């Protein structure tokens, strides 16, 4: 991995946009919430079958649910993540400008 060169020398990274960080974290939180929701929904469905579960099926299902939750959170424009953004962006420092929508 290469180090980032900035005005301060080695290791000085550019300052991150607080609104972009807020947006990313809010959507990550929404992804975790949706993953928990998917897991609860799966537990409500009986898994009894003639052959039972195949080896690795539970792990595959968990990974699939996790990926689907992350994708759903990224593409939802009226979800929990957007509500969090609207509430929390009011607390950002005054110097930051709202994102254009």
Image (cartoon, rainbow, N blue to C red):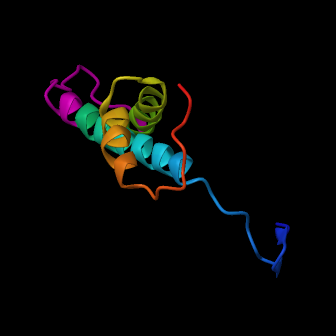
Q: Residue at x 15, y 24 (%)?
A: 46
Q: Give the answer, above or below, for where 14 lies relative to 52.
A: below
- Position in image of residue 98 (x %, y %): 51, 39
Residue 59 visible in the shown view? no
Q: Give the answer, above or below, for where 71 lies relative to 91.
A: above
- Position in image of residue 79 (x %, y %): 32, 28
Q: Main secondary structure of the magenta part?
A: loop
Which quadrant, please, contains the N terminus?
bottom right
- Position in image of residue 12 (x %, y %): 76, 74
Q: Give the answer, above or below, for where 28 lies relative to 91.
A: above
Which stretch is magenta? 40-57
Residue 20 visible in the shown view? yes
Q: Residue at x 39, y 47 (%)?
A: 89
Q: Farthest residue to the bottom: give it.
A: 9
Q: Nearer the viewer, residue 30 or 12?
A: 12
Indicate whether residue 92 is drawn in magenta: no
Q: Residue at x 44, y 29 (%)?
A: 68
Q: Nearer the viewer, residue 46 or 22?
A: 22
The reply, left or right, for residue 50 in relation to residue 22 is left
Q: Residue at x 48, y 31 (%)?
A: 74
Q: Farthest residue to the front: give it.
A: 94
The reply, left or right, for residue 1 in relation to residue 53 is right
The image quadrant of residue 85 is top left
Q: Nearer the viewer, residue 96 or 9?
A: 96
């Amino acid at each position: 991995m290469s180090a980032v060169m900035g005005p301060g020398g080695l290791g000085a990274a550019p300052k991150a946009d607080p609104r972009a960080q807020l947006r990313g974290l809010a959507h990550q939180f929404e992804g975790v919430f949706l993953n928990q929701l998917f897991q609860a929904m799966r537990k409500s469905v009986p898994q009894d079958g003639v052959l039972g579960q195949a080896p690795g099926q539970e792990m595959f299902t968990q990974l699939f649910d996790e990926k689907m939750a992350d994708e759903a959170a990224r593409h939802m424009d009226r979800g929990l993540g957007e509500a969090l953004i609207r509430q929390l962006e009011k607390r950002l420092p005054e110097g930051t400008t709202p994102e254009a929508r």
